[in-house]
Amino acid sequence: RGDAKEALSLLNTGITVAGQAGALRVLADMQVMKSRLLLAVNDLEGAEAAAESAAIASQEGGETWQVPRRILLLAKIHYKRGEFRKADEVYDQAETFIDALVGKASTVLDKTALIRASDEIYTKHFALLANHIGSTEKAFSVVEQVRGRVSRDMLMAGSRAGSKDAQQAERKIS
């Protein structure tokens, strides 16, 4: 504990073993740990490379629902660098991926769960746009995009607007 160099060495060994074994989910998780460690010691280039590798391994390993959270890590790295426009682009990419996942989900409950699991992405993107880019119009469009998606899917599924689940979903998104 507290020895970043040793932790990095162990992670690199684990990443090599997981990669050789084709254990993509383990590989992705270890790449995330490596990225966070490198971010903590301010090695932003290394953190970015590890985060990108984690997103790729998650997608290749069939954990597509993890990809937006891996992309979120990339946005945080660009934010820390002060690259706010690049962070905005990365958030847009994550939200597009989420929208595709929501579109493929078979039930309103699954769709709502995906959006709830991704709320940090929308919240941080909103804050970035409002506080650092100065685009309140785009910030509110982020909120409206997700609200519109859930409302549309509920209408398509025949959900009543006043149902308890719909009200809870609306409160969470708002």
Image (cartoon, rainbow, N blue to C red):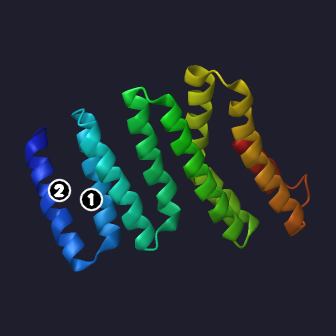
Residue at image mark 2: 11
Q: In this rendering, is residue 88 above or below 133?
A: below
Dot 1 crowding, Cα within 10 Å, few <14, some 14–19, many 20+: many
Residue at image mark 1: 30
Which one is nearer the viewer's eye here, 114 or 126? 126
Q: Is residue 133 left or right of residue 46?
A: right
Residue 143: x, y in percent? 72, 39
Q: Are marks 2 and 1 in contact (CB under 8 Å)?
A: yes
Which one is nearer the viewer's eye here, 163 or 43? 43
Give the position of the N terminus as an image quadrant.
top left
Write the residue at 28% across / 51% down: 33
The image quadrant of residue 55 is: bottom left
Dot 2 crowding, Cα within 10 Å, few <14, some 14–19, many 20+: some
Residue 82 visible (yes or no): yes
Residue 59: x, y in percent? 45, 67
Q: Is residue 52 left or right of residue 112?
A: left
SS for callout 2: helix
The image quadrant of residue 37 is: top left
Residue 35: x, y in percent? 29, 47
Q: Is residue 23 left or right of residue 170?
A: left
Gap in angstroms between the C-alphas marked 2 and 1: 6 Å
Q: Which mark is residue 21?
A: none
Q: In this rendering, is residue 111 above or below 93?
A: below
Write the residue at 70% across / 44% down: 172
Give the position of the C terminus as an image quadrant.
top right
Residue 13: x, y in percent? 12, 62
Write the residue at 80% across / 49% down: 148
Amino acid type, residue under disc 1 in the picture = Met
Write the residue at 89% across / 61% down: 155
